[in-house]
Image: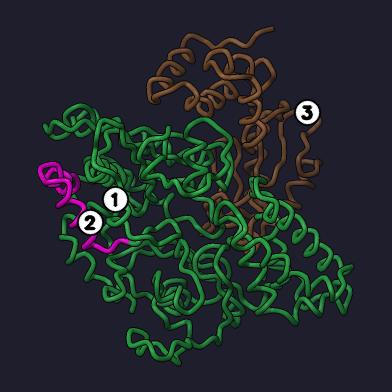
């Protein structure tokens, strides 16, 4: 169901909406004042009740992740915020950094306290210069009012927040690559275990959270964790509260929209997104960034014998609420919750070629299946488009992609393989047409 | 000739170092600082400077420089024009914008204009999908592009 909210976005669009004054006028920095007087365990319990699923793409419960940190015992703990927004189709975190940076800072303060950290690094991709500027500005404002520093709000719990920049590498959005990058190394992912909570930044216990995940924490504490979670239609799926939904591609109103969890793709595309450009039919939708499977307009949910899915079973996939577990159960993925929409004016073969070039460019190169597999698939799709591929090579796509999945240090490999696997499965005929017609396709383009 | 930082930049470097528990962590911010002060590229002298200042092997710094897209190992033009090419932008006509830039500037992707003013490059997703097609020139995003807007932007930059 479509329920617009404005907990994060209330001040969006206002020229001074990002200032401390505007943030406090809306009740900002009251939740953290309460948190800093609570016991650490109570803060984590409250966070768990909110059922905030990680908003970076993995959907791991935030309160639970915070509880993995060891009890402070002399070693420094770190909170690191993943603001390396780079998943194709995704542009939501940037809006928070630019237009509501204090929500991020307050969330970081709550997070630091919950995990026993006194230092927080916000790792922002370098290209987002305005985001960095706004975050530093907010940090200066907060420091000058005594909200950050040695005695935040008069409490004896020092907290410092710094902005750290990347240097152009999508893989640094992977949490262990991000940590390596923060440490001043090449952004290559690490094997897990050990997990960051055991050995993270500089070898010390660390929690990595997405920007949006921490930014909504103050709201969760303002309303109370349980009350926040119940705003969601998927509270019973432990998928609580409100979030930012994105839509781009062939829609009339691309953008970021804040709603209660429970929104469906149909509502996102046709209500919020204004419908398809030129009112053309929907050909495909990628629900949450390019590492998710692509879906056809007429897919039906098939989850029998599951009481929680009873309202959705047998109904269109477009009417399934966008949630971490609802999508995982049907074999899809919510990812970043920013949908990419393709009308029938887009050629799916060209779309696949476009994405493969991205993954080949961004592979860090450590793991042979990913490094070689991405390169192979890129060359293969180029041949398909050029009209020089064979049907046997089209058959090979699934095999090559399947050899990447599960055989890599990090999930990038799975993310790179997923589009290839689902595009070849859902649009098989289009690929075969290219081979049979030596490259001449139906539409031959991506832009209507 | 060795690379040196101005006094103001040295103070910035000191600020940067104070944020981290060790010197290696300052590697990327230090490289950005030095690149910005060196006509937007990381020369061998810059690598030498960062390596000495941060007490890191030059090979380590070189490894970092070669990993990340935004560290230029060759001197670019005065302005770097990055046109986003990934799917959401492509769905809204980034190909046509890229073609237009190539024709207008008279260079191919990765090349610099003869007068040294512009280097044209493609970028992967710049987190601006709702305002596509778009490009980043130096530190500024230009969104909702049309060929006419591109002409305006490039003309304005050409003048300075």
Q: Which residues are magenta?
A: A28-52
Side of B5 where B156 appears, left or right: right
Left or right of A47 in this view: A433: right
Return the residue nearer the eye: B158 or B15: B15
Spatial CA distance of label 1 from label 3 is: 54 Å
Q: Which chain is brown?
A: B
**Which residue is denoted by mark 2 in the rendering?**
A47
Q: Are marks 1 and 2 in contact (CB under 8 Å)?
A: yes
Q: Secondary structure at mark 2?
A: helix
- Measured as percent of width and height from the top left, residue A22 is found at 23, 45
Which chain did the image draw in green? Answer: A
- For marks 1 and 2, give the CA distance: 9 Å
**Classed neighbour count for the residue bearing mark 1: other residues with Cα under 10 Å, few (<14), some (14–19), many (≥20):** many
Find numbered disc 1 in the image and state the secondary structure of the residue it sits on.
Answer: helix
What type of secondary structure mainly makes up the magenta span? helix
**Upstream in the sequence, badge 1 or badge 2?**
2
Label 2: chain letter: A
**Furthest residue toward top:** B1
Instruction: Residue A346: give x, y in percent of width and height.
Output: 67, 72
Q: Which residue is mark 1?
A: A66
């Amino acid at each position: 169901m479509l329920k617009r909210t404005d907990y994060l976005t209330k001040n969006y669009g206002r020229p001074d909406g990002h200032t401390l004054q505007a943030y406090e006028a809306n009740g900002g920095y009251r939740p953290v004042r309460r948190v800093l007087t609570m016991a650490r365990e109570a803060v984590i319990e409250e966070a768990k009740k909110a059922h905030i699923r990680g908003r970076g793409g993995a959907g791991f419960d935030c309160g639970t992740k915070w509880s993995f940190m060891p009890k402070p015992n002399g070693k420094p703990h770190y909170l690191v915020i993943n603001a390396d927004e780079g998943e194709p189709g995704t542009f939501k975190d940037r809006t928070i950094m630019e237009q509501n940076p204090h929500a991020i800072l307050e969330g970081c303060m709550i997070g630091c306290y919950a995990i026993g950290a006194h230092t927080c690094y916000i790792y922002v991709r370098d290209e987002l210069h305005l985001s960095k500027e706004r975050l530093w500005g907010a940090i200066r404002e907060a420091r000058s009012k005594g909200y950050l520093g040695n005695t935040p709000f008069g409490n004896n719990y020092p907290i410092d927040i710094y902005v750290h920049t990347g240097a152009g590498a999508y893989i640094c959005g992977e949490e262990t690559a991000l940590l390596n990058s923060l440490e001043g190394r090449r952004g290559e992912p690490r094997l897990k275990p050990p997990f960051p909570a055991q050995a993270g930044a500089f070898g010390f216990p660390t929690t990595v959270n997405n920007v949006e995940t921490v930014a909504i924490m103050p709201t969760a504490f303002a309303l109370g964790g349980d009350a926040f979670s119940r705003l969601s239609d998927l509270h019973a799926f432990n998928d609580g509260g409100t979030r930012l939904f994105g839509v781009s591609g062939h829609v009339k109103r691309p953008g970021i929209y804040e709603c209660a969890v429970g929104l469906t793709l149909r509502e996102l595309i046709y209500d919020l997104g204004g419908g398809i450009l030129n009112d053309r039919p929907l050909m495909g939708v990628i629900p949450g960034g390019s590492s998710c499977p692509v879906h056809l307009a007429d897919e039906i949910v098939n989850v029998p014998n599951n009481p929680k899915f009873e309202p959705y079973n047998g109904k269109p996939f477009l009417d399934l609420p966008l949630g971490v577990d609802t999508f995982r159960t049907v074999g899809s993925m919510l990812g970043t919750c920013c949908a990419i929409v393709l009308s029938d004016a887009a050629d799916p073969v060209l779309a696949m070629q476009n994405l493969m070039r991205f993954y080949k460019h961004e592979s860090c190169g450590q793991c042979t299946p990913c490094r070689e597999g991405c390169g192979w698939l890129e060359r293969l799709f180029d041949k398909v488009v050029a009209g020089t591929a064979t049907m046997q090579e089209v058959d090979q796509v699934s095999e090559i992609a399947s050899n990447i999945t599960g055989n890599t240090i990090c999930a990038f490999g799975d993310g790179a393989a997923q589009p290839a696997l689902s595009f070849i499965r859902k649009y098989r005929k289009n690929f075969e047409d290219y081979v049979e017609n030596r490259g001449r396709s139906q539409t031959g383009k991506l832009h209507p | 000739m060795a690379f040196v930082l101005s006094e103001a930049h040295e103070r910035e470097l000191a600020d940067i170092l104070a944020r981290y528990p060790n010197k290696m962590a300052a590697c990327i911010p230090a490289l950005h600082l030095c690149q910005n002060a060196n006509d937007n590229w990381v020369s061998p002298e810059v690598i030498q400077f960062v390596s000495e200042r941060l007490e890191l092997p030059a090979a380590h710094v070189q490894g970092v420089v070669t990993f990340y897209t935004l560290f230029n190992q060759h001197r670019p033009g005065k302005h770097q024009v990055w046109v986003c090419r990934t799917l959401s932008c492509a769905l809204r006509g980034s190909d046509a914008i890229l073609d237009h830039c190539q024709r207008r500037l008279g260079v191919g992707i990765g090349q610099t204009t003869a007068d040294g003013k512009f280097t044209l490059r493609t970028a992967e997703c710049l987190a601006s999908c709702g305002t596509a097609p778009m490009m980043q020139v130096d530190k500024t995003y230009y969104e909702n592009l049309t060929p006419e807007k591109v002409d305006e932007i490039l003309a304005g930059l050409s003048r300075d």
